Amino acid sequence: MDPLVLLPCEEEEAPPPPAAGVQMGAYWGPVRAVGESGGAGETMLLWALGQPASQRHNAFVRQSSHSLTLDACGRRLSLLQSPSSMATPGVTGAVVWDSAIVLAKFIEHSVDSSLLLLRGARAVELGAGCGLAGCVAALLGAHVLLTDLPDRLKLLRKNVDLNVLACRGSARVADLVWGDEPDPDLLNPPLDFVLGSDVIYSEEAVDDLLLTLNHLSAPQTTIILAAELRNDVVLECFLDAAMADFQVGCIEQEQWHPDFRTSRVALFILLKKPPLASSQPDLL
């Protein structure tokens, strides 16, 4: 396993504040706060207005193919996939999902729009799967540790080696089991970003996911998650549990890359609450 070493963040000038909306963490675009209505209100809003079930499934990917290409960061990325692995129960990270495309292109679009600075930032991608979001973050200048379960790393490492070349950032691969204590070296200095796509997929995994997010987060850590809207119960469970320790916001589609928008995906930002605020209502 590669050592859990990420380079320190390089300082850059902060971007201008957003023109409207709430600003959360290191993202300077407008964010809609998930407020007092909690997980139930948010899922009702997403399902009632977006009608995700009526939208095309896998609009941006071809999961039957052994590779997927995507233009990003001024180059053509090629992600290896293993469609046959999807027959194994519990294995979902062997192919690219729409949420990974949306997250990767959102990151690129936000950097291009000066709403996000990644150069020199320290980042971790959780449940990286094929590694698209982490690779894009590295190409945009971040020092990224892409993580997944130990038996999922072979394909992930191949994609990192294939796509993260001649760039200002860097990418490493390591196993990380949700719920386990992370290596202390990973958190010193604290992370700037935690990224994840399609990590909110089962009620059974919510507690371990949130425990890992808590382990990885410092006050300045910005968490950006792209969720596939398959099951409103699972998302409601996650949001309600997350709001105990995190401020939660939703990034509306108007802020996404204009060519990669779908109502089957939602983008969330999470910020760790100060210790005294963990049991208090959000003040966003």
Image: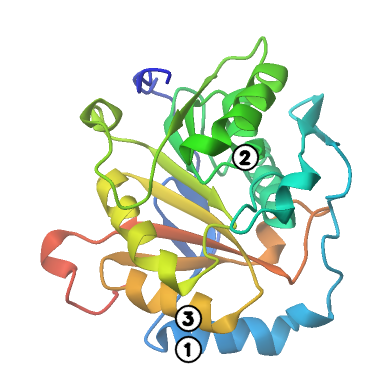
Asked whether residue 284 appears in the rendered view, the answer is no
Q: Amino acid at mark 3?
A: Glu
Q: Are marks 3 and 1 in contact (CB under 8 Å)?
A: yes
Q: Report the side of 93 relative to 32 (left or right).
A: right
**Is 167 situated above or below 155?**
above
Residues at marks 3 and 1, CA–CA distance in whole angstroms: 6 Å
Residue pointed to by mark 3: 236
The residue at which mark 1 appears reads as 40
Q: Residue furthest front?
A: 88
Mark earlier in primary sequence (2, 1): 1
Provide the residue designation for mark 2.
133
Give x and y (percent) for residue 91. 62, 52
Q: What is the spatial separation of the Cα atoms under label 2 and label 1, in whole angstroms? A: 28 Å
- Say which label, 3 or 1, has the lower sequence index: 1
Quadrant of res 189: top left
The kind of residue tagged 2 is Ala
